[in-house]
Amino acid sequence: MKRMKKIRNLLSVSLLLCLLVLGAAVVQAKPTIAKTGELSIYPFYNENKLSYYVYNYEFPMITIKGVQADAAVSVLSCSDKNMKLEISPTFLDKEIAMEEDPEEIEEEKSEFDHICRINITTKNSKAKLNLSGITVKLRVTQGGKNYDLTAKVKYLKYKPLRKIIINGKNVTKKFSPYYRTITMKLAGKKLKWKKGHKKDNVIIHRKKKGSTFPSVVPKTKKLKKGDEIIIQQYKAKKEFYVFVK
């Protein structure tokens, strides 16, 4: 009986030690970059000037795993100063958390899954972007230690898969694999567009004075300066933009 009792005691101690080791391993897990998404570029005209807006192709852009609820996450630097980075959950960004409702912060913590997500957009549109991608340096502070991480985010690359013919001109090669935009002297003319694929589609947008959103113009109408022709290619799953001048 004494021997069995000793064995049970030894097993209990061993189990307790295992639980302590596992618990310590969970607490001391280092935060790491789990994955990064890809940046897309959306073109638009503002006061007759072509600009570009950068946004996430998929959300979230940067994912960090192994982050504790008592951690603080901050952005040390970004190679493109025009980029805006948003940290989620918000309580991981102490500056933002101070402005949030304490009850909402507690609710966030209760649903926290030890993953930090960072969304990226441009602060301001600009015509020229560094297409080699961006490098983001991050710091996770938890358990009295600083963990510095580096994430490299690239732009989405693709090639048009079908011909784009507008008013008799093959303009496929004029499109950039990133920007997908060109300008053409088409004002006063009707749009003549040849499909590259039977499911391809084309839309003409026209901005009106005093209106925030553009209106759709029938293809039978003559084009005006500033019109935006959007070519939606079904096969490539991408859009191409022709700005009328």
Image (spheres, rainbow, N blue to C red):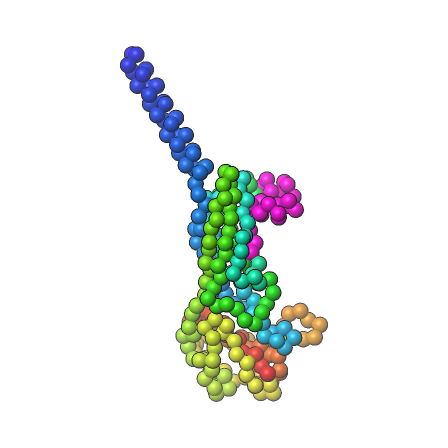
Q: Is residue 33 left or right of residue 98?
A: left
Q: How many marks?
A: 0
Q: Does 129 appear in magenta? A: no
- Can you say which quadrant of the picture contains the N terminus? top left
- Relative to 45, residue 33 above or below: above
**In the foreground, 94 or 220:** 94
Q: Which residues are magenta?
A: 85-107
Pinpoint residue 157: horizontal percent, then vertical percent. 43, 68
**Which quadrant holds residue 86?**
bottom right
Residue 228 visible in the snapshot:
yes
**Which quadrant holds residue 213?**
bottom right
Residue drawn at (46%, 54%) of the image: 150
**In the foreground, 221 or 210:** 210
Residue drawn at (54%, 65%) of the image: 54
Pinpoint residue 12: horizontal percent, then vertical percent. 36, 22
- Relative to 191, residue 2 above or below: above
Q: Does 101 appear in magenta? A: yes
| Residue lying farthest to the right in this orientation | 210
- Relative to 42, residue 23 above or below: above
Q: Is residue 122 left or right of residue 47?
A: left
Residue 221 visible in the snapshot:
no
**In the foreground, 187 or 148:** 148
Q: Is residue 22 left or right of residue 221?
A: left
- Can you say which quadrant of the picture contains the C terminus? bottom right
Pinpoint residue 169: horizontal percent, then vertical percent. 47, 86
Pinpoint residue 143: horizontal percent, then vertical percent. 50, 38
Residue drawn at (47%, 77%) of the image: 175
Residue drawn at (59%, 75%) of the image: 50
